[in-house]
Amino acid sequence: MADTHSLELLVQALRCLPGVGVKSAQRMAFHLLQHDREGALRLSQALQHACSSVKHCTMCHTFTENDICPTCEDPRRDRGLLCVVETPADQAAMERTGAYKGLYFVLMGKLSPLDGVGPREIGLQKLFERIDATEQGERVVREVILATNFTAEGETTAHVIAQGLKTRGVNVTRLARGVPVGSELEYVDLGTIAHALVDRR
Amino acid sequence: MADTHSLELLVQALRCLPGVGVKSAQRMAFHLLQHDREGALRLSQALQHACSSVKHCTMCHTFTENDICPTCEDPRRDRGLLCVVETPADQAAMERTGAYKGLYFVLMGKLSPLDGVGPREIGLQKLFERIDATEQGERVVREVILATNFTAEGETTAHVIAQGLKTRGVNVTRLARGVPVGSELEYVDLGTIAHALVDRR
């Protein structure tokens, strides 16, 4: 396909998508041009529109088209609870449970020194400022729920945040580790069972 | 991420890419908006540009920005040889070998009745017309090389084309089936060895 300049540019541009290499990009370009030009144009417009209109909520850092996202603006939410998650997708998962009625802080990433992602990149300073905010002399946030992922990097991120909050006198909790709903003990990994045993209630 | 309309539209639009489901689309949208807006805008422009400028070569059906692609226009190529391939990517693979100096006909697909792809969709009529073309009373194409893939659908396509050419008095060949270069017999599948044995020379 090397003869066609704009096709070559499209293949290169598609490689900016995560997990897409040369072969996949060629397959995508071929599919779009041969079978779905309408979809390609729709994607082009959606990209442009999203890039120009999506920014970060000044309160919680999640994606929004306004200054403050609808979740942060919702007056029915408990402002004393602050749930810290890694991404908007994690936030959406929390929301789907319907079990949480507090507010969020979305890190938009996780600590990963090898990738050059430090406390500054995930906005920890802003998180601490938000937690320190007071209203009529009293701290607004009563409890910080650390809901970063249970991966090595997520755990590190949670640990660093917990350390930073130690001296602040705010209640810090972490999502419970344990046996997933619907699973049989025989097939659950040992680390999970050990955690579930320690945290039994 | 459901609160943000243009983000939701972007996730939906990304699903037009082959092999991309909801989760991948969300991951892509998140990556682009958080880490690579420049790439997203470049992709948006590349899509628009490719859709407006890439069309099909009137001779061989491959993608090109002109009426006739550079390969078909090349006067050094042997017009008596016509290689039939499924996609521009297959054509590019043939070209990279440097072993072929004839022209191409790109089907832009393969026969697949279950997906609604019949002889008309892959332009068989046009292929036959091209093979029947004469110059000063003589047929231009001496030999048709069937280089569709060696999958069930590719073999079927080759078979159908070969049947259509049976009565035309043109030489029809198929790429040789045999043991791949650099492989050990022990690890080659039996069908391939059987073919290599039958076609030994």
Image: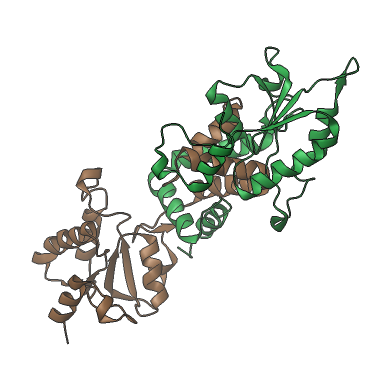
Chain colours: A green, B brown
Q: Is residue A35 left or right of residue B50?
A: left
Image position, residue A189 (x, y; %)? 47, 47
Image position, residue B86 (x, y; %)? 31, 60
* Number of numbered markers: 0
Hey, which residue is sitting farthest bottom in the picture?
B201
Instruction: Note whether residue B158 is visible.
Output: yes
Q: Is residue A166 left or right of residue B174?
A: right
Hey, which residue is sitting farthest right in the picture?
A137
Q: Residue at x 90, y 14 (%)?
A: A136
Among the 4 quarters of the image, the one containing residue A44: top right
Q: Residue at x 56, y 44 (%)?
A: B28
What quarter of the picture does the N terminus of chain A occupy? bottom left
The one of A95 and A192 positioned closer to us in this rendering: A192
Image position, residue A141 (x, y; %)? 78, 23
Among the 4 quarters of the image, the one containing residue B2: top right
The one of B143 and A193 positioned closer to us in this rendering: A193
Above-or-below relation of A117 to B184: above
Q: Is residue B132 left or right of residue B40?
A: left
What quarter of the picture does the C terminus of chain A occupy? top right
Above-or-below relation of B142 to A7: below
Instruction: Note whether residue B137 is visible.
Output: no
